[in-house]
Every structure is written in structure tokens, then in C-alpha cells.
Image: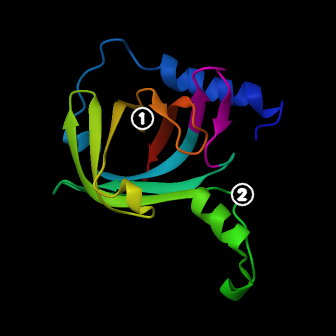
Amino acid sequence: MQSPEEAPMLCSLCAVALLSIPATADAIEPSEVYGTWKLVSSVTRFIDSGEERNTLGSKPVGYITYSPDGRMMTVAVSNERPNVEKATNLTDADRAKLFRTMWAYAGTFTLNGNAITHHVDASWNEFWSGQDFIRDIVARDGRLIYTTKPQMSVQEGKMEVLTIVWEKVR
């Protein structure tokens, strides 16, 4: 849940990402996505209310890698995950929160103009395996900005748009 202090920051992050996308952006070339990218932000905006929240907390940790052979993989975690001394101390509630505060999947990818499609072969939650994730994509200033089309939120049951910003690892 976002605090009132976070609301302006979240809105600013989405506004900067969305306003930086030109109406007629040039098509992305595969060479522009090759390499490893670090997660900067993952923000969900609910369409009905306009409410925004950091999908994986205020300081998520994650990476996505694309290779010239057409393979990709990604993992990301929230900075708000439970931390216990040893695995035997994990409760079912801890396990559920760990599951809900991450993503990890691998597969292949294709580019089509300003859209990237991840064809998921394996994932941390089996209902993603075999799915295609299509994102609008813009490459700008060493960053990739992904935006989903409006989609139904799996966790909230409301229509949402997800904006994910990645920064090239140097």
C-alpha cells in the first residue's frame, strides 16, 4: 500500500516514463536490447481510480538479459520481502509473501516495431509458462521503458497498466 508521501513520486515516475514516449517512435532494433538491464522501477496504475503503486516496493532489485540467439531471462524481487534466519523458520504466510513479491521467467523474445514479446518457457508460477507477454517498448538514454496494454490484474482483479523501467548495466 502506498503512503501519501509516495503518491507524488509514483505519479512523477509514470509521467516521466509515459511522457518520454514519442507518438511515432522509431522501431526498436534487436541490437538495442541485447545485454543485461537492471530494474529501476515497476509501477502499476489502476485504470478505474488512477491509483498508482510500486509493484515490487520502492527499491526493487531485478535484472533482465537478452541474447543475440533470441533467448531472454528475468528475475526481480521486492525490497519488502520477509527475511528469516533459515528456511525452516518460514511460515506459510512468509512463503506466500515471498511468492507474491517476485517474478522470474525465461524463454525467447521477438521484436515487432515498438513491441517486444516474451515467449515464456519456464516461470516461477506455472500459469505464466507457455504465455506470451507483449509490451510496448521505447529505448531512451540507456533505458528500456516497457508499458503493457490495459490488462486484468491477477492480484487485484482490476484493470491496470504496468510500466517497467530498465537501465543498461555497463
Question: Which residue in the rendered view is the most extreme toward the left?
Answer: 69
Quick one: which residue is furthest to the front in this view?
A: 157
Residue at the farthest right position: 4
The verdict on residue 104 being magenta is no
**Residue positioned 70% across, 86% down in the render:** 86
Q: Residue at x 73, y 72 (%)?
A: 83
> What's the residue type where badge 1 is placed?
Tyr
Q: Which residue appears at 56% of the width and 41% of the height?
A: 42
- Using the rendered view, name the quadrant where residue 36 is placed: bottom left
Local crowd size for mark 1, using a 10 Å CA cut-off: few (<14), some (14–19), many (≥20): many
Number of numbered labels in the structure image: 2
Near-viewer residue (71 or 154) = 154
Say which element carries label 1.
Answer: strand
Mark 1 highlights which residue? Answer: 146
Residue 46, magenta (yes or no): yes
Residue closer to the observer: 5 or 34: 5
- Examine the rendered structure and indicate whether residue 150 appears above or below residue 104: above
Task: Tell me residue 136's x, y (percent).
Answer: 35, 30
Which quadrant, please, contains the N terminus? top right
Residue 77 seen in render: no
Q: Is residue 115 something that shows in the picture?
A: yes
Residue type pointed to by label 2 = Glu
Instruction: Name the residue at 35% across, 32% down.
Output: 137
Measure the C-alpha gap from mark 1 to mark 2.
23 Å
Q: Is residue 40 left or right of residue 69?
A: right
* Left or right of 61, for residue 32: left
Q: Which residue is mark 2?
A: 80
165 displayed left or right of 114: right
Q: Is residue 56 above or below residue 146?
A: below
Magenta range:
43-56
